[in-house]
Image (cartoon, rainbow, N blue to C red):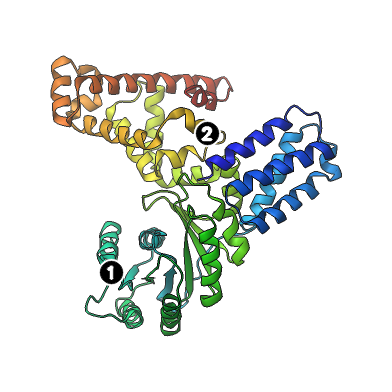
Amino acid sequence: MFADLSGKLGAVFKKLRGDARITESNVISAVKEVRMALLEADVNYKVVKDFVAGVEKRALGEEVLASVTPSQQFIKIVKDELTEILGGKNYLPKVHLSSQPPTVALMTGLQGAGKTTACGKLAAYFMKNGKSPLLVACDIYRPAAIDQLETVGRKTGVAVYSDRNSRDAVKIASDGVAFGKKAAKDIVIIDSAGRLHIDDELMTELEKIKSAVTPHEIFYVADAMTGQDAVNSAAEFNKRLDISGIILTKTDGDARGGAALSVRKVTGKPLIFAGTGEKNEEFELFHPERMAGRILDMGDVVSFVEKAQEAIDGEDAADLEQKIKKQGLNFDDMLKQFRMIKRMGSLGSLLKMIPGMGSMLGNIGDISTEDKMFKRMEAIILSMTPLERRKPLVINASRKKRIAAGSGRTVQDVNRLMDHLNQMNKMMKRMTKMTKQGKDPSKLFKEMF
């Protein structure tokens, strides 16, 4: 979502690279451009004003004036100030769990913000951490809202409490929490109704639900693509409900994304989670410093490594390393890699975590197309026999026809996949050789683009 902002800030930093040192003149010029970039990204005006004042004050300090690398110093200052706006360097996001289960989490927000989907992702997050969640359907107004939550529950493997005969959201919430206690659930997540705009009826109902179930967490679900509407509604929800934290959804969208930089500052409440894609796995705790790095196209290597550690089996990794050194990878190995990438999230969200890749994404093309390509390649591999997957060299012309027919693809598609495997093996060998020589193998990745 920060692609446009990242590009504009990158242009500001690029201008400073030619200067020998930071001076008052080039700082004022750079700060002015940063201010315009933030305002164009729909960041709240007061937030922009405080931000640029902090950057200007620090940039004109003595420790920066003595520097011979002005662009690097300025980037660090901007990153530090962004981190501060988003919560601070030492902020650690966490959910407060009740000592006497179940912990009750009330999800609030406007209609269309992704609240129901966020309920499923939050449930999946707790399941991954060994908890047993329950979803409660309290949206009795929106057509098919209960059906949608039940679909989310089935996909996530989480039970859903609902009462289709009741028109009393407060009673459903109370009964849902009581059901959660009986069923020995650790977490009860209440999906409340939203509106296209804030109205007194909505807020009064939420206040009654809060009074009835006494939630341990009240999350405001903010659509990162809605701009100042998200900020203004968050402030109103906080005023009426005293929210405990914010969940940002759709941070993988193409909108300006300025709301994400504004909502915490305006409400004074922490950003707890960020939804970075459609999959349940693309939902993570919000780390201000890491997000600031992504905005500035400095990547987020820590999150990338964490996702990789969750997805990669240690024995598989060791086995893969030996294969690369000896005979190279086969289609079974390629299939494992595709599935590992799927567990880590979408290709686009992963690339944005690699330093410098944000600005390169425009050269790669439509990332969603790349994800579809993975699915097509997987279908071709699954149409192969175990022998063909283990020993690609046995695949002759007649076998290619059978594989193409079985996967619904063409022989040309099968040929392209075989070429892809050959290229992958060549690149792996080059990377292994570079590592032995003490060179940086990541340069090979950049050469691809």
Give the residue displayed 72% in from the left and 35% down from the top: 71
What residue is disc 1 on? 160
Which comes sooner in the sequence, label 2 or label 1? 1
Instruction: Give the image location of residue 196, x and y in percent.
Output: 41, 65
Give the class, few, some or many, for how many residues have Cα within 10 Å of label 2's Cα (few <14, many ≥20).
Answer: many
Give the residue displayed 64% in from the left and 52% down from the top: 83
For residue 194, above or below residue 240: above
For residue 175, above or below residue 325: below
What residue is disc 2 on? 357
For residue 99, above or below residue 249: below
* Residue 186 or residue 197, whichever sits in front: 197
| Residue 89 visible in image | no
Instruction: Give the image location of residue 232, x and y in percent.
Output: 55, 64
| Residue 428 visible in image | yes
Disc 2 from disc 1: Cα separation: 40 Å
**The label number, if any, that marks residue 408 in the structure image:** none
> As shown in the figure, which amino acid type bears the numbered disc 1?
Val
Circle 2: element type: loop
